[in-house]
Image (tube, rainbow, N blue to C red):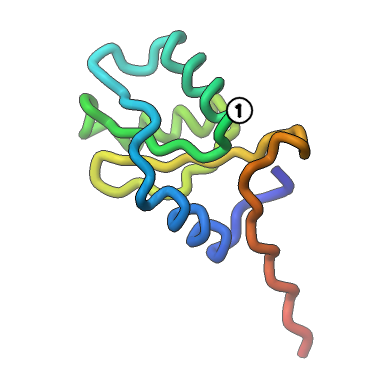
Amino acid sequence: MPGPLTNSQLKHLRGLAHNAPPALQLGKKGLTPEFLQVFEFTLSNQELIKLRFANFKEERNELSASLVASTGAALVSLVGHTAVFYRQSPDPDKRKIVLPRPAAPKKD
């Protein structure tokens, strides 16, 4: 991914994830190596993941930060017990999501 996501790109991704059901659910076992492997696989194939925190609801901020650090994904939103993550596919042929272009800086 070229750089941090702009507000318009985050808004676009939130819109795409809004009606989608959660692709994964973080349960009582937490961030196990198996869960991270499934998260990584799903992220590679879908680019945008909606994750539901079934357990660890109080720790969702820390767990989301840990997922961002370990996978290189961007946290798009964290509302209630649901988080949305995005990571652009490194292979241009497998990219499914086209982000809006960042606005050019204004010249005075």
Asked if residue 18 is positioned above or below residue 62 in the image, the reply reads below
Q: Residue at x 60, y 54 (%)?
A: 5
Q: How many marks?
A: 1
Residue that appears at 30% across and 33% down: 52
Question: Front-most of 35 and 70?
Answer: 35
Question: In terms of depth relative to the viewer, which is nearer, 98 or 4?
Answer: 98
For the N terminus, the image quarter is top right
Where residue 21 sits, quadrant-wise, is top left
User: Depth check: 108 or 14 in front?
Assistant: 14
The location of residue 107, given as percent across then percent down, is: 78, 85
Front position in the image: 24 or 106: 24
| Place of residue 43 in the rendered image (x, y in percent of width and height, measured from the top left) | 55, 30
Residue type highlighted by circle 1: Ser
The residue at the point 44 percent across, 54 percent down is 14
Q: Residues within 10 Å of mark 1 (few under 14, many from 20)?
A: some
With respect to residue 94, does 75 lie above or below? Answer: below
The answer to whether residue 8 is left or right of residue 99 is left
The residue wearing badge 1 is 44
The furthest residue to the bottom: 108
Q: Position of residue 8 (x, y in %)?
A: 55, 65
Image quarter in which the C terminus is found? bottom right
Q: Is residue 47 left or right of residue 20?
A: right
- Mark 1, secondary structure of its residue: helix
Q: Is residue 100 left or right of residue 35?
A: right
Left or right: 58 in relation to 90: left
Image location of residue 62, percent across then percent down: 36, 32
Whether 74 is drawn above or below 31: the answer is below
